[in-house]
Protein backbone atom coordinates (compact mmCIF):
# COMPACT_ATOMS: atom_id res chain seq x y z
CA UNK A 1 0.00 0.00 0.00
CA UNK A 2 1.39 3.36 -0.96
CA UNK A 3 -0.29 6.63 -0.19
CA UNK A 4 0.97 10.12 -0.68
CA UNK A 5 -0.99 12.45 1.52
CA UNK A 6 0.09 15.70 -0.01
CA UNK A 7 -2.46 18.46 -0.59
CA UNK A 8 0.18 21.13 -1.11
CA UNK A 9 -0.63 21.51 -4.82
CA UNK A 10 -4.21 22.52 -4.01
CA UNK A 11 -5.13 26.11 -3.21
CA UNK A 12 -7.83 26.83 -0.64
CA UNK A 13 -8.27 25.07 2.66
CA UNK A 14 -11.77 23.76 1.89
CA UNK A 15 -10.49 22.21 -1.33
CA UNK A 16 -7.52 20.72 0.51
CA UNK A 17 -9.83 19.06 3.04
CA UNK A 18 -12.06 17.77 0.20
CA UNK A 19 -9.05 16.17 -1.49
CA UNK A 20 -7.78 14.84 1.84
CA UNK A 21 -11.15 13.24 2.63
CA UNK A 22 -11.15 11.36 -0.70
CA UNK A 23 -7.68 9.91 -0.03
CA UNK A 24 -8.48 9.31 3.64
CA UNK A 25 -11.62 7.24 3.03
CA UNK A 26 -9.48 4.93 0.88
CA UNK A 27 -6.81 4.74 3.56
CA UNK A 28 -9.14 3.53 6.32
CA UNK A 29 -11.47 1.41 4.18
CA UNK A 30 -9.87 -2.00 4.70
CA UNK A 31 -8.64 -1.81 8.32
CA UNK A 32 -10.56 -2.59 11.49
CA UNK A 33 -8.04 -2.25 14.31
CA UNK A 34 -8.66 0.95 16.27
CA UNK A 35 -5.02 1.67 17.16
CA UNK A 36 -3.91 1.14 13.56
CA UNK A 37 -6.65 3.45 12.29
CA UNK A 38 -5.84 6.19 14.82
CA UNK A 39 -2.12 5.93 14.04
CA UNK A 40 -2.56 6.26 10.28
CA UNK A 41 -5.11 9.05 10.70
CA UNK A 42 -2.56 11.05 12.72
CA UNK A 43 0.16 10.33 10.15
CA UNK A 44 -2.04 11.20 7.15
CA UNK A 45 -3.17 14.51 8.69
CA UNK A 46 0.41 15.33 9.60
CA UNK A 47 1.68 14.50 6.10
CA UNK A 48 -1.06 16.49 4.39
CA UNK A 49 -1.20 19.61 6.54
CA UNK A 50 2.13 19.63 8.40
CA UNK A 51 0.51 20.23 11.76
CA UNK A 52 2.86 21.03 14.67
CA UNK A 53 1.22 18.42 16.92
CA UNK A 54 -1.62 16.13 15.92
CA UNK A 55 -2.94 13.22 17.87
CA UNK A 56 -5.59 11.45 19.85
CA UNK A 57 -6.59 11.22 23.47
CA UNK A 58 -8.99 8.36 24.15
CA UNK A 59 -11.38 8.01 27.09
CA UNK A 60 -10.24 5.29 29.49
CA UNK A 61 -12.26 5.18 32.71
CA UNK A 62 -12.21 8.72 34.16
CA UNK A 63 -9.40 10.18 32.02
CA UNK A 64 -8.41 11.00 28.47
CA UNK A 65 -5.29 8.95 27.82
CA UNK A 66 -2.68 9.79 25.18
CA UNK A 67 -3.10 7.77 21.99
CA UNK A 68 -1.35 7.70 18.60
CA UNK A 69 0.12 11.05 17.59
CA UNK A 70 2.71 12.87 15.48
CA UNK A 71 4.87 15.42 17.26
CA UNK A 72 6.78 15.81 20.50
CA UNK A 73 6.11 13.87 23.69
CA UNK A 74 2.88 14.98 25.37
CA UNK A 75 0.95 14.74 28.64
CA UNK A 76 -0.39 11.25 29.32
CA UNK A 77 -3.68 11.89 31.08
CA UNK A 78 -6.28 14.67 31.11
CA UNK A 79 -9.29 14.87 33.43
CA UNK A 80 -12.81 15.66 32.19
CA UNK A 81 -13.33 19.41 31.98
CA UNK A 82 -9.59 20.16 32.20
CA UNK A 83 -7.80 22.05 29.42
CA UNK A 84 -9.02 22.25 25.86
CA UNK A 85 -9.21 18.47 25.43
CA UNK A 86 -11.07 17.90 28.69
CA UNK A 87 -13.51 20.68 27.77
CA UNK A 88 -14.20 19.10 24.35
CA UNK A 89 -14.91 15.86 26.24
CA UNK A 90 -17.18 17.48 28.84
CA UNK A 91 -19.12 19.61 26.32
CA UNK A 92 -19.02 17.19 23.34
CA UNK A 93 -18.39 20.20 21.09
CA UNK A 94 -15.36 21.16 18.97
CA UNK A 95 -13.11 23.69 20.71
CA UNK A 96 -11.47 26.28 18.46
CA UNK A 97 -8.87 28.21 20.46
CA UNK A 98 -7.09 31.04 18.59
CA UNK A 99 -4.83 31.88 21.56
CA UNK A 100 -4.16 29.13 24.08
CA UNK A 101 -2.88 31.65 26.65
CA UNK A 102 -6.40 33.07 26.83
CA UNK A 103 -8.07 29.68 27.39
CA UNK A 104 -8.63 29.16 31.12
CA UNK A 105 -6.91 25.97 32.26
CA UNK A 106 -5.11 25.29 28.99
CA UNK A 107 -2.63 22.44 29.50
CA UNK A 108 0.70 23.38 27.93
CA UNK A 109 2.32 20.16 26.74
CA UNK A 110 4.63 22.34 24.66
CA UNK A 111 5.47 25.95 25.42
CA UNK A 112 5.60 26.52 21.64
CA UNK A 113 1.90 25.76 21.18
CA UNK A 114 -0.05 28.98 20.43
CA UNK A 115 -3.42 27.86 19.05
CA UNK A 116 -5.39 24.65 19.11
CA UNK A 117 -8.45 22.80 17.79
CA UNK A 118 -9.98 19.81 19.52
CA UNK A 119 -12.73 17.71 17.91
CA UNK A 120 -14.65 15.25 20.09
CA UNK A 121 -15.06 11.71 18.75
CA UNK A 122 -18.67 10.80 19.48
CA UNK A 123 -20.01 7.27 19.15
CA UNK A 124 -23.53 6.29 20.22
CA UNK A 125 -23.93 9.77 21.78
CA UNK A 126 -20.88 9.27 23.99
CA UNK A 127 -17.50 10.97 23.66
CA UNK A 128 -14.96 8.14 23.26
CA UNK A 129 -11.95 10.36 22.60
CA UNK A 130 -10.74 13.59 21.01
CA UNK A 131 -8.67 14.62 18.02
CA UNK A 132 -6.26 17.32 19.22
CA UNK A 133 -4.26 19.56 16.88
CA UNK A 134 -1.83 22.26 18.02
CA UNK A 135 -0.10 25.00 16.06
CA UNK A 136 2.94 27.08 16.90
CA UNK A 137 1.16 30.03 15.25
CA UNK A 138 -1.64 32.13 16.74
CA UNK A 139 -5.12 31.65 15.23
CA UNK A 140 -3.95 28.91 12.86
CA UNK A 141 -7.37 27.21 12.75
CA UNK A 142 -10.70 28.48 11.48
CA UNK A 143 -14.14 27.22 10.61
CA UNK A 144 -12.85 25.48 7.47
CA UNK A 145 -10.59 23.37 9.71
CA UNK A 146 -13.48 22.66 12.06
CA UNK A 147 -15.74 21.48 9.23
CA UNK A 148 -12.96 19.48 7.53
CA UNK A 149 -11.72 17.81 10.71
CA UNK A 150 -15.25 17.01 11.90
CA UNK A 151 -15.74 15.17 8.59
CA UNK A 152 -12.49 13.26 9.13
CA UNK A 153 -13.73 12.23 12.59
CA UNK A 154 -17.14 11.26 11.16
CA UNK A 155 -15.45 8.82 8.76
CA UNK A 156 -13.10 7.55 11.46
CA UNK A 157 -15.75 6.92 14.11
CA UNK A 158 -17.68 4.61 11.78
CA UNK A 159 -14.66 2.29 11.97
CA UNK A 160 -14.16 2.43 15.76
N1 LIG B 1 -3.23 21.54 25.20
C1 LIG B 1 -4.10 20.42 25.48
C2 LIG B 1 -3.33 19.27 26.09
C3 LIG B 1 -2.81 18.29 25.11
S1 LIG B 1 -1.46 18.81 24.27
O1 LIG B 1 -1.74 20.05 23.55
C4 LIG B 1 -0.85 17.69 23.21
C5 LIG B 1 -5.21 20.85 26.40
O2 LIG B 1 -5.23 21.97 26.93
O3 LIG B 1 -6.11 20.04 26.60
Image (cartoon, grey):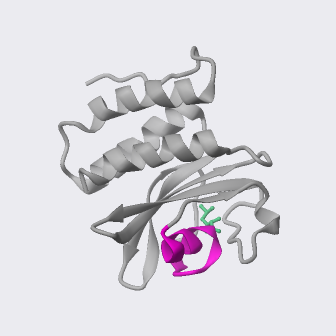
Q: Is residue 108 visible?
A: yes
Q: Would you say 66 lies left or right of 159 here?
A: right
User: Looking at the image, which residue sits at the far bottom?
Assistant: 62
State the quadrant of the C terminus. bottom left
- Residue 120: percent from the left, percent from the top? 46, 62
Residue plotted at (52% across, 65% down): 93
Quarter of image, res 110: bottom right
Outermost residue to the top: 9
**Image position of 141 (left or right of 81):** right
Number of numbered tags placed on the structure image? 0
- Please name the residue shown 50% across and 54% down the image: 55
Residue 20 lies, with reference to residue 10, above or below; the image says below
As drawn, is 58 to the left or to the right of 97? left
In this rendering, the answer to whether 137 lies above or below 125 is above
Could you say where residue 126 lies in the image, as x and y percent from the top left? 34, 72
* Rendering coords of residue 123 (x, y %): 30, 64
Residue 113 visible? The answer is: no
* Residue at figure coordinates x 56%, y 58% from the top left: 118
Q: Quadrant of residue 85?
A: bottom right
Q: Quadrant of the N terminus?
A: top left
Residue 86 lies in the magenta stretch: yes
Q: Which residues are magenta?
A: 77-92
Residue lying at 54% horizontally and 26% vertically, measured from the top left? 16
Where's residue 108, x and y in %?
71, 67
Assess whether residue 33 is covered by the magenta stretch.
no
In this view of the protein, which residue sits in the foreground, 100 or 18?
18
Indicate which quadrant contains ligand 1. bottom right
Amino acid sequence: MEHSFSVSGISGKKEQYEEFLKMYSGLIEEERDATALLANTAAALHDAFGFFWIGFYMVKEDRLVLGPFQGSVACYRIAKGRGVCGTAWAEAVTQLVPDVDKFPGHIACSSLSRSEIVVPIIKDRTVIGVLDIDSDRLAAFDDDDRVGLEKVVELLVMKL
